[in-house]
């Protein structure tokens, strides 16, 4: 049994409208741009920058989609950046061990 009153007609939470804007993941997008993978991080920043504007203009579905895309691209940038850094470290160790044997 719920003790909370129902949402006001047309207010936040009514008719399936989310009560607050989604997180835009801008900080994560900036960090992945700086430290992981620049091109994919920039894509994440572009989507993150769209979230608040779409929300304020009433495009709630578009804001949620942009937030989801920003998060997805930030994750892809972080994972790809990690993988590439591991590959570079392995190649550096291989090159160092090959040059030290001669």
Image (tube, rainbow, N blue to C red):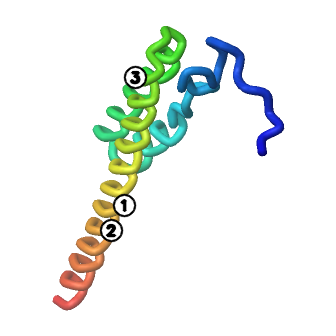
Q: Is residue 97 above or below residue 44?
A: below
Q: How many marks?
A: 3
Q: Say which label, 3 or 1, has the lower sequence index.
A: 3
**Pointers 2 and 1 in contact (C-beta within 8 Å):** yes
Q: Residue furthest top?
A: 57
Q: Residue furthest left?
A: 102
Q: Residue furthest right?
A: 3
Q: Which residue is mark 1?
A: 82
Q: Is residue 30 above or below residue 18?
A: below
Q: Does residue 34 appear to the left or right of 101 in the view shown?
A: right
Q: Residue at x 16, y 89 (%)?
A: 102
In the rendered structure, find residue 62 and report the number of the disc placed on it. 3
Q: Does residue 38 appear to the left or right of 56 in the view shown?
A: left
Residue 83's spot in the image, x, y percent?
31, 63
Q: Secondary structure at mark 2?
A: helix
Q: Does residue 79 appear to the left or right of 21 in the view shown?
A: left
Which sits in the foreground, 45 or 38? 45
Which sits in the foreground, 5 or 88? 5
Residue 23's spot in the image, x, y percent?
56, 34
Circle 2 residues within 10 Å: few <14, some 14–19, many ≥20: few
Q: Secondary structure at mark 1?
A: helix
- Give the alpha-carbon distance from disc 3 to disc 1, as whole Å: 30 Å
Q: Residue at x 80, y 33 (%)?
A: 4
Q: Residue at x 23, y 72 (%)?
A: 91
Frontmost of labels 2 and 3 is 3
- Give the alpha-carbon distance from disc 2 to disc 1, as whole Å: 6 Å
Q: Quadrant of residue 2?
A: top right
Circle 1 residues within 10 Å: few <14, some 14–19, many ≥20: some
- Give the alpha-carbon distance from disc 2 to disc 3, as whole Å: 36 Å
Which sits in the foreground, 75 or 67? 67
Q: Which residue is mark 2?
A: 86
């Amino acid at each position: 049994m719920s003790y909370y009153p129902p949402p006001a007609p047309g207010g936040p939470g009514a008719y399936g409208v989310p009560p607050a804007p989604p997180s835009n993941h801008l900080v994560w997008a900036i960090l992945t741009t700086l430290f992981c993978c620049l091109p994919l991080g920039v894509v994440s920043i572009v989507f993150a920058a769209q979230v608040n504007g779409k929300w304020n203009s009433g495009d709630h579905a578009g804001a949620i989609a942009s937030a989801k895309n920003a998060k997805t691209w930030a994750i892809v940038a972080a994972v790809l950046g990690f993988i590439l850094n591991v590959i570079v470290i392995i190649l550096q160790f291989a090159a160092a061990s090959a040059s030290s044997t001669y």
